[in-house]
Image: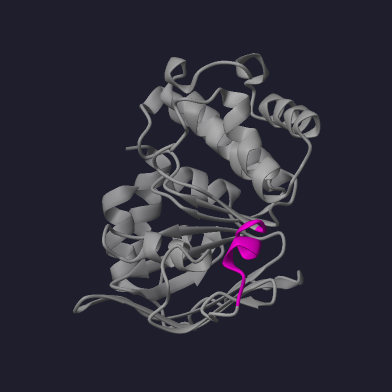
Amino acid sequence: MSTTNETTVNETHQPEVASAAPAVPEHKGQVVIDVRDLRKTFGKTEVLKGIDCQVHAGEVISIIGPSGAGKSTFLRCLNGLDTPTSGSVIVNGYDIADPKTDIDKVRTQIGMVFQHFNLFPNMTVAENIMLAPTLIKKVPVDQARARALELLRTVGLEEKIDANPDSLSGGQKQRVAIARSLAMDPDIMLFDEATSALDPEMVGDVLQVIRDLANKGMTMLLVTHEMAFAREVSTRVIFTDAGIIEEEGTPAQIFGNPQSPRLRSFLSKVL
């Protein structure tokens, strides 16, 4: 444990002076995701218990919290992989829960990268990246391949364009998965613990790709256990616990001056 982290955690256990809870950071970008009273139940288990959240264009939001807090379910509700039990999720003006909404159209605007890479092993790297643009957007093959090469150059894998996914390392596969999501030119990117399945030495390359996207202004929500990275790259951090948003604020507020006893306890274990 580093000296810096020890200092931060120990300070959070000092007697508190009464103060107002930190305000949610202000952001002037357009609201691209508007979540109101989002609830999700699986059987008799209520995983999300009334989530309210707005995401503005250009924000990078890290979602942290213990296992079972509903972080991944929240992300999956944002692109329709899980259907909300109640409440509303509006993405770029489309209500995800409305049966009349063309969910495939919405998904062209909101890319998602999972823990596991889900690349098609019977296709080359280029074919994996080109598949959705050619099938869904009807992009010509030569144009789709040129875009695939451009994206592979962005993630540092230009030389792997004709490789088979089985020949790649885990970190390389995840970078291809990111390129595949970007091939649809989404407005928003969701990352669900994108580095958790990787060996430690492979994590840095994937985080660098995400860092570069943040620097270019991509709107992103990241479920992550990489606390140092969340502190560095985020405009806002959301701490979830037991299906609710327990606390949210700037990285400086969340990591340096947490208000919730539950958040202080969580940080004492992970920093």
Q: Position of residue 100 (x, y in %)?
A: 59, 80
Can you name the residue that lies furthest to the left here?
A: 44
Q: Position of residue 35 (x, y in %)?
A: 54, 78
Q: Residue at x 53, y 80 (%)?
A: 99
* Closer-to-camera residue (110/64): 110
Residue 13 visible at all: no
Drawn side of residue 148 relative to residue 81, left or right: right
Whether 9 is among the magenta residues is no
| Residue bounds of the magenta highlight | 101-109
Q: How many numbered marks, from 0 up?
A: 0
Colour mode of the rendering: one colour
Q: Is residue 7 above or below residue 260?
A: above
Query: Which corner quadrant of the image does residue 212 belong to?
Result: top right
* Closer-to-camera residue (37/112): 112
Q: Position of residue 150 (x, y in %)?
A: 75, 29
Q: Is residue 150 above or below residue 224?
A: above
Residue 260 visible at all: yes
